[in-house]
Amino acid sequence: MPWQAFALVVLAGLIHAGWNIVAKRTSGDARFAFFTSVVMGVVWAPLALWVGHESVPHWDWRAWTAVTVSGVVHVIYFVTLLRGYRKGDLTVVYPLARGSGPLLTSLLAITLLGERISLVAASGIVGIVLGVFFVAGGPALWRQGRDEASRNRLRAGVMYGLLTGVFIASYTFVDGYAVKVLLLSPILVDYMGNFVRLAVLAPTVLRDRAETVQLWRTQWRSAAIVGVFGPVAYVLVMYAMQMAPLSHVAPAREVSMLFAAVIGGHLLGESDRGVRIVGACAIALGVVALGLG
């Protein structure tokens, strides 16, 4: 993996972990996802207009299909992630989602896009997956919790984490195809897909306008943070996809686990931090192996 792509992924990982911690503390639902999309649409409009005013009118059906599918999958992903944060711990949901997603993405890239992977890079993927397992709690995932509420919270965290990982793999593959094969601008793929997200989420927002207004008053600051910085993290990843194989970039994104395990666990007061730090170190070694591969 070129060092430029590696640097982009590391920076994106720090930003990504940060906005996920904000989303977790907000405990929002689909309406929070809508708020973030509104902020993104307004803040990033000048850049999107500058980048796309000449190219977007010439997009063919393949480009619009890719953007539409990307937007729909991103909505499902974010709403599922938010529900997982309400039902489980960040240090369970986040690492399981981030670990299962790139594993599936790498398999898709290797089998469907014909990408090849070296032994060193393959060992890096294995290290990342094992690290994610320990970040999520390690053997404790199979042990009984202290009470029924703890067991239910753990089961919910595991379920939503893995389900979110499936959607991460889906949108990463679609967006990777858009920027690598169709040669679309990463900025435009994310921004134009945002209009799809707004359309899909609008019925939920309009169903109870009074409650939506009340939620906006309490969540707008968090929505602003996610809406501004969330796109930055993912656009950096898509630029990295243009410079390096998708099967390398997707797992390397898990460097965000280093930040989420240390910062998130401390801020949220979640348990098993020692085991999760060990897992984060395994992820770091895996990322280095990917960089060398």
Image (tube, helix red, strand yellow):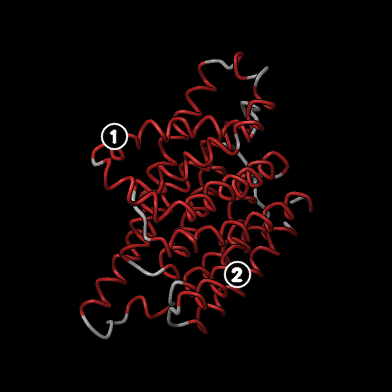
Q: Position of residue 179 (x, y in %)?
A: 63, 33
Q: Residues within 10 Å of mark 1 (few under 14, many from 20)?
A: few
Q: Secondary structure at mark 2?
A: helix
Distance in Å between CA atoms under marks 1 and 2: 37 Å
Q: Secondary structure at mark 1?
A: helix
At horizontal 27% and vertical 86% (from top left) the residue drawn is 146
Q: Which residue is mark 1?
A: 203
Q: Which residue is mark 2?
A: 258
Q: Position of residue 75 (x, y in %)?
A: 40, 41
Q: Position of residue 34 (x, y in %)?
A: 40, 42
Q: Quadrant of residue 231?
A: top right
Q: Quadrant of residue 279?
A: bottom right
Image quarter of the C terminus: bottom right
Counting residues from the N terminus, which is met first, the one under dot 1 or under dot 2?
Answer: 1
**Residue 41 falls left or right of residue 30:** right
Q: Quadrant of residue 253?
A: bottom right
Q: Position of residue 214 (x, y in %)?
A: 32, 50
